[in-house]
Amino acid sequence: MSWLRIGFVLLLLGTWVFYLAGYIKKEPVRLGLVATLSGTHAELGVQIRNGAQLAVEKINETGGIAVRPVELVICDDLGTREGALAADEKLITAGVAAIIGHSTSAQTLTGLTITGPAHIIMLGPSISSPIFTGKSEYFFRVHPSFLDGMQGFAQHIYNRQLTKIAILYDMNNAAYTETYRTAFTDKYQQLGGTIAGEAAFSSTVKPDFNPLLVKLHEKNADALLIIAADIDTAMIAQHARLMGWKIPLFAAAWAQTETLIYHGGQAVEGMEIEQAYTLTSQDPDYLDFKQRYQDRFGRFPSFGAAYGYEATMVLAAALHKTGGKTKGLRQALLEIRDFKGLTNNFSFNQYGDVVRPIYLNVIRNGKFTYLDTLTQGQ
């Protein structure tokens, strides 16, 4: 009788070991992540990658997706059209269920020419240009369009009695910067403001900001709006202050990373920035994320890190519904309602867009500080 019991126990153990072996060998659910991870404009992409990595770790700690582990397949798009094409092709070949990326509008536009026809979801963590609304049925984003927030930004600047503004922007990310410049100009002039002067530069070569700033300085503007990445915005502020130009500085959301403060120093003190993420939130989920990010990476998370995390988590929620498969993922994302983000809830509309609050921040004592809410969101 005892031998029968021993045999039965061994059979149960064998079955359990076989089950565990099957679980361990389960094919992972692969999520692609593509962003600019090298070069002078890499900070935003690195933050997005770090946020996504934190999310994947949390997902795997809680059982993965459909009892399968999640694997993050990471590619660097090098900040170029060619790099974006190569990276997205590589991810599709690797069999990813969806792609998180890119970090800039220019590379996203390029990537959609590949991911759209392949029916692969691309979820943008930091893409805010309104030109993407309805661009592809396979494109979603957790960052809201900047259109409403930018108009509130223009209103705020005009209300400060700054009625004559100069604009300096990076022409290499035109899908973002040109659209932002045009929309801002339309709203600002509608309010009664004047565009004193405009100048464009190419961030792909080492730009010389001095001649551009001298030219704009001669226009006697009340303020300067910079539409560029963090490092370029910091350098423009430095050059402006060195030449004695003391007018108020304003910047688009693209610039809001720690790189701006680190390289800008005193030159960016008082700079005001519109942003779709309040980095001073006291939401318990955000505070937990912030602490885990600092413990893991030894630095403060930017909006890119937070949105990289949220993009990964909402994809995981949708993939739970599809059993980890690409088929049906678009519909699963559209069906998600009031997803709990780090600071507020969001849902996707029929265009894959979200409506979330836009905030006004200022750099004060070397830190981003909340000033006001430009739009209320949902």
Image (cartoon, helix red, strand yellow):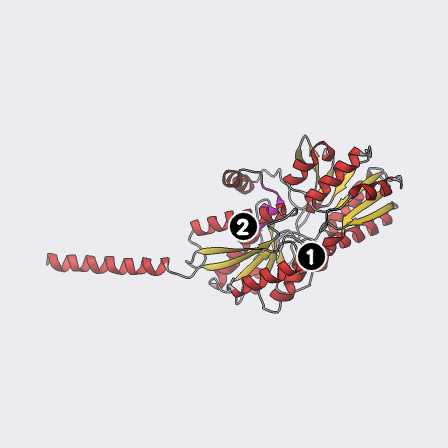
Hey, which residue is sitting farthest bottom in the picture? 117
Viewed as shown, does residue 17 lie left or right of 65?
Answer: left
Report x, y in % for residue 106. 69, 57
Tag 2's secondary structure?
Answer: helix
Q: Does the rendering let one see residue 190?
A: yes
The prevailing secondary structure element of the residues shown in magenta is helix
Tag 1's secondary structure?
Answer: helix
Neighbor class of circle 1 (other Cα within 10 Å; few <14, some 14-19, many 20+) is many
Q: Nearest the camera: 62 or 84?
A: 84
Which of the two discs, 1 and 2, labels the residue nearer the N terminus?
2
The amino acid pointed to by label 1 is Ala
Q: How many callouts does the rendering have?
A: 2
The amino acid pointed to by label 2 is Ala
Q: Quadrant of residue 6?
A: bottom left
Report x, y in % for residue 321. 49, 61
Hey, which residue is sitting farthest top in the picture? 365
How far apart, in angstroms, are the residues tagged by discs 1 and 2?
Answer: 21 Å
Report the disc number at residue 106: 1
Residue 302 lies in magenta, yes or no? yes
Report x, y in % for residue 241. 78, 34
Q: Which residue lies under the disc numbered 2?
A: 52
Report the disc number at residue 90: none
Residue 200 lies in magenta, yes or no? no
In the displayed structure, would residue 58 be above or below residue 258? below
In the displayed structure, would residue 117 be above or below residue 300? below
Start-end of magenta stretch:
301-309
Q: Quadrant of residue 349?
A: bottom right
Neighbor class of circle 2 (other Cα within 10 Å; few <14, some 14-19, many 20+) is many
- Residue at the image point whose x is 65% and y is 47% from the top: 41
Q: Are marks 1 and 2 in contact (CB under 8 Å)?
A: no
